[in-house]
């Protein structure tokens, strides 16, 4: 099932075929109902296909994974789904669980910065800027510009063009 999940992920990300990713991830799930990564991959593909209820169902199941890293991928997918639906405050609240687990990766900071900007939560955005500036690859004083630029990118990737335009 994990090889099938990897194929499904590649179909979605590299080939732009979320429809095929759903089919392959579903086969992986039929082989192993506990393959949380397959649910996360299928949830992301469903979200891209604007099948939001199916995506939510997959992400909620995958969030039950006891492994923190795998669970965080599902939460990140759920967060993107909410951003795609213009539900910025819930996206920020759900996504913050990843921060609470100790993760401070750039991609998570970018995702949550977009949710914070969409929700108008400047306090959390400033906190995220400080966290970004702790990363070795981010120069002191450049965190705000970096997170603003990446927030716009995340918003555009999730079809939130009017919100992205407000940040320009």
Image (cartoon, grey):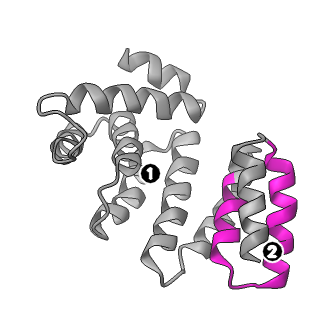
Left or right: 123, with 56 as reference point: left
Let me know if residue 66 is in the magenta part: no
Q: Given this view, does label 1 or label 2 mark the residue nearer the observer? A: 2
Question: Residue at the location (46% across, 23% down)?
Answer: 164
C-alpha separation, residue under disc 1 versus residue under disc 2: 28 Å
Between 43 and 134, the one nearer to me in the picture:
134
Against 150, is 64 above or below? below
Name the residue at 85% across, 80% down.
30
Quadrant into which the N terminus falls = bottom right
User: Which of pointers 1 and 2 lies earlier in the amino acid sequence?
Assistant: 2
* Residue 64 percent coordinates (x, y): 54, 80
Q: Disc count in the image?
A: 2
> Magenta: predominant secondary structure element?
helix
Residues shaded magenta: 17-44
Image location of residue 16, percent across then percent down? 77, 40
Residue 51 can be seen, yes or no: no
**Which residue is at 60% across, 73% downward?**
62
Q: From this viewpoint, which residue is outermost toward the left?
A: 140
Indicate the quadrant where residue 168 lies. Answer: top left
SS at badge 2: helix
State the residue position of label 2: 28
């Amino acid at each position: 099932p994990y090889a099938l999940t990897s194929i499904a992920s590649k179909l979605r990300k590299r080939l732009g075929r979320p429809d095929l990713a759903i089919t392959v991830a579903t086969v992986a799930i039929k082989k192993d109902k506990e393959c949380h990564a397959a649910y996360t991959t299928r949830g992301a593909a469903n979200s891209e296909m604007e099948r939001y209820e199916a995506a939510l169902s997959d992400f909620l199941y995958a969030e039950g994974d006891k492994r923190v890293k795998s669970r965080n991928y599902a939460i990140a997918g759920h967060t993107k789904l909410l951003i795609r639906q213009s539900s910025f405050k819930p996206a920020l609240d759900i996504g913050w669980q990843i921060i609470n687990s100790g993760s401070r990766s750039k991609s998570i900071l970018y995702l949550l910065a977009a949710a914070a900007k969409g929700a108008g939560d400047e306090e959390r955005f400033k906190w995220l800027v400080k966290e970004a500036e702790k990363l070795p690859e981010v120069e002191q004083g450049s965190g705000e510009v970096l997170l603003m630029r990446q927030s716009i990118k995340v918003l555009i990737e999730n079809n939130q063009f009017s919100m992205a335009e407000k940040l320009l």
